[in-house]
Amino acid sequence: MNDGCDENRSLELEYRSFSLELASPLETANGTIDSRDGFLIRIVDAASDGSDPVVGYGEAAPLPGWTESPADCGAALERAGDAIRTAPTEALEAVDGQVAARHAVTLALADLQATREATPLYRHIGKGPMVGRVPVNATIGDGSPTQTAREASEAVDRGFNCCKLKVGRRSVDADIERVRRTREVVGPDVELRVDANEAWTYEEAVTALEAFDELEVSIAEQPLPGGSLEGHADLREAQGDDGVSIALDEGLLEHGIDAICEAEAADAVVLKPMALGGVDVARKVAAWVQELEITPIVTTTIDGVVARTGAVHLAASIPEVPACGLATANLLAADLGRDPVLLEKGAAVVPQAKGLGVEGVWAE
């Protein structure tokens, strides 16, 4: 990463903890999440020539099962704060192996440099053209068939043309009925995806995918446990070129791209910058998988506005990115500051201000 520093500049890293309550509790395989707790950081570049300081913001929101613990994250940020006075590279070494902490530091450094360059973050990390919007999907929870169909219909009325339904916590037959009712309500032109979060056995996945193929579901995310590359490869082969595409999320973190490609286990991979260790890492993975004709899909880990906006910029830096899981602000009851990303007609409007474009997150 080009930190853009010279001998006339001095960097200071500060961090503070936060706790953001969710609008409603989220049930996961690792337990119930009531809030997203983490650290907001800022890196201040104070020039010795008396010019105004430049600030970059980052966010570390550890998530059980995905990242390091909050204690390890905080310790890594403390080390980074000490090391960055020497050089940004020293700070990166201080957070090596702690993915949420690394996400925060690298995002703040990228925001800092893009702000210096007076360019939006997505152009700084992608070196590509201006992008006004990126498509996003609506995420539909695990409700009854009637509730699921109603929520999807409401999302379509708000302009979404892609809905991802959470499945796997009910019986396969119940989930098939939920998808069937939803398809009846939203019609044939809305893209439907499902996310099983590792819930099914191979036999259950086969049954579900056969029905979902008839219902024109486009993508099934993580139908089997993350360790089952061979099982996902078998599912993918059974679906053929015209069936439901298989996307890996947890499986990407567990195995990496090389093993996934060798097993031919995925048509798409889900990129969570917080869990991968930064938007820079996620951007490299996206470029890599696109060369391999695997589709990258960017999502958040229900992050605060700083990390969430970083994910929007990441998606904007990826050519021909499909609908991404970035419309997650409504899952939080409170946030770190004003959201600079507008959602309009099924797309996130990408901030065109310099850097991330976030403001008011570090109230003194």
Image (spheres, rainbow, N blue to C red):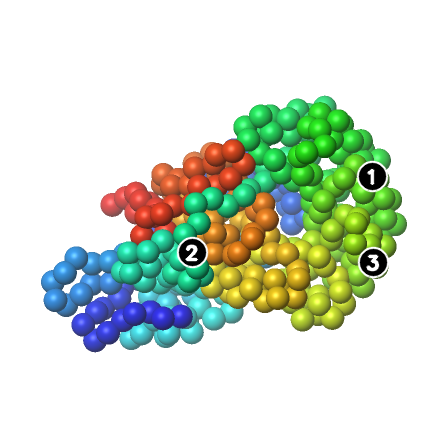
Dot label at residue 237: 3
Tell me the residue that label 2 is attached to: 129
Rendered view: 188 above or below 42: above
At which x and y percent is residue 59? 42, 53
Q: Secondary structure at mark 2?
A: loop
Left or right, 334 with respect to 259, comes to: left
Residue name at image x 47 percent, y 59 percent: 279
Label 3 Cα crowd, 10 Å radius (few <14 / some 14-19 / many 20+) = some
Of residues 231 and 291, the one nearer the viewer is 291
- The three-letter amino acid code for the residue at tag 3 is Glu
At which x and y percent is residue 180? 78, 31
Q: Secondary structure at mark 3?
A: helix
Q: CA distance from mark 1 to mark 2?
A: 39 Å
Q: CA distance from mark 3 to mark 2?
A: 37 Å
Q: Secondary structure at mark 1?
A: helix
Q: CA distance from mark 1 to mark 3?
A: 17 Å
Tell me which numbered mark, 3 or 2, is placed earlier along the sequence. Answer: 2
At which x and y percent is residue 154? 60, 25
